[in-house]
Amino acid sequence: MTKNRSLILPAVVLGVALLALAALYFVDSASALPSFIPGHEAGSSHHHVKHGIAAAIIGFTFAWFQSGPAAR
């Protein structure tokens, strides 16, 4: 992935937002999620752990590759 310096700040912001979304998936049940978030199911007590793990991995990965050291 090519590092673009203008994408570092948005990547970090997106990473933090995805980490917050991951925490929301871990803490709230599917019925307590806002209706615009994928995984919302009315009346369900299921927690979307896999959604939370995926959001966390994507957030860390994109921010890592955009803010890591440049190739030599």
Image: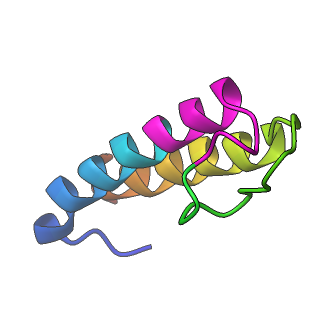
Q: Is residue 18 left or right of residue 52?
A: left
The verdict on residue 29 being magenta is yes
Where residue 7 appears, x then y in whole percent? 20, 67
Residue placed at 88% from the left, 37% from the top? Answer: 46
Which residues, given as a range, are shown in magenta? 20-33
**Toward the viewer: 9 or 2?**
9
Residue placed at 37% from the left, 46% from the top? Answer: 17
- Name the quadrant of the N terminus: bottom left
Residue placed at 56% from the left, 34% from the top? Answer: 24
From this view, report whether residue 22 is shown above or below residue 41: above
Q: Is residue 42 left or right of residue 22?
A: right
**Toward the viewer: 60 or 2?**
60
Residue farthest toward the top in the current orientation of the protein:
27
**Toward the viewer: 51 or 42?**
42
| Corner quadrant of residue 39 | bottom right
Residue placed at 87% from the left, 43% from the top? Answer: 44
Residue farthest toward the left in the current orientation of the protein:
6
| Corner quadrant of residue 2 | bottom left
Where residue 4 appears, x then y in whole percent? 21, 72
Where residue 49 appears, x then y in whole percent? 80, 37
- Name the quadrant of the C terminus: bottom left
From this view, report whether residue 15 is shown above or below residue 66: above
